[in-house]
Image (cartoon, rainbow, N blue to C red):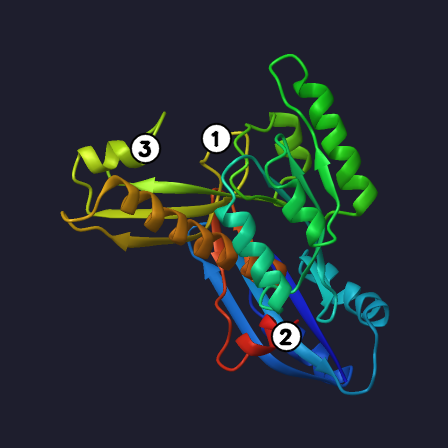
Amino acid sequence: MKNYVLTVTCKSTRGIVAAISGFLAEKGCNIIDSSQFDDLDTGKFFMRVGFISEEGADRAQLTEAFAPVAGKFAMDWDIFDGQDRMKVLLMVSRFGHCLNDLLYRWRIGALPIDIVGVVSNHFEYQKVIVNHDIPFHHIKVTKDNKPEAEARLMEVVEQTGTELIVLARYMQVLSDPLCQKMSGRIINIHHSFLPSFKGANPYKQAYDRGVKLIGATAHYVTADLDEGPIIEQDTVRITHAQSPDDYVSLGRDVESQVLARAIHAHIHHRTFINGNRTVVFPPSPGSYASERMG
């Protein structure tokens, strides 16, 4: 028996769930988890269904057979093989905490992805990457060569079949055309403060203002810097007794955790872009272990 995931986005109307469940039953499939959401503000419907083919139907057969059902409701949809691992390209600059965390999760099987390469505008982590038997690509970025650098990046994306780009503290702003071309396929992580601090050394600024909560936000990348649809967030509490170095250490920890959770949700097709927001379905009870191990 093979595991599959069906994702659906369409206009909310009666009969969608019945049509999907009826189709799967007719094709000898058993639903093992299901999540759905009706956005009353936009009139859009979102659904994710995990199911098992008990009669051995493959993805191509199911995709062909489901097309008429999808057409009836004008669905934006796809069927994914649960055994397939998403091809992910990591990008990093000089802060390596998120990169190292992702490499560790990948190595122990907690993040079931295929890392097809790491791109950096510096050489600090070349040896670490090569020691993991992962291709390393140095792409220098300056004010004068940005178009050429992004063209080289897209060559890497196309050559490796990259399905998702992860900016693991990559400190270069991507151009609008690149963001549009890879819309919904680039995830970024950045720190979050209340109040907000920008510019150099935000953790020192937060310390000077006595901030009691710091956090991190993972989001899809758009042309608006750090303002794309949010996938995952978290915070950590600070006390008056902690130093600026403590702020940095705690901030790095929460950034790593939030980024990993955002990637986990994306690669298991639990995220749906809903305008400037996202719909993110949680793992169903009992499903996290199977998701974690792919």
* Residue type of the residue flagged with mark 1: Leu
Q: Which residue is mark 1?
A: 225
Drawn side of residue 115 relative to residue 233, left or right? right
| Other residues around mark 3 within 10 Å, as few (<14) / some (14–19) / many (≥20) | some
Question: Where residue 53 sits: x, y (%)?
Answer: 76, 82
Above or below, comparing residue 267 to residue 157 in the picture: below
Q: Which residue is mark 3?
A: 202
What SS does tag 1 mark?
loop
Decide which of 95, 280 is in the foreground and name it: 95
* Residue type of the residue flagged with mark 3: Pro
Drawn side of residue 175 relative to residue 233, left or right? right
Q: Which residue is mark 2?
A: 50
Above or below, comparing residue 141 to residue 155 in the picture: above
Task: Point out the tag, 3 or 1, that comes first from the N-terminus.
Answer: 3
What is the C-alpha distance between the residues marked 2 and 3? 42 Å
Quadrant location of the N terminus in the rendered image: bottom right
Question: Where residue 290 sits: x, y (%)?
Answer: 61, 77
Question: Where residue 33 sits: x, y (%)?
Answer: 57, 78
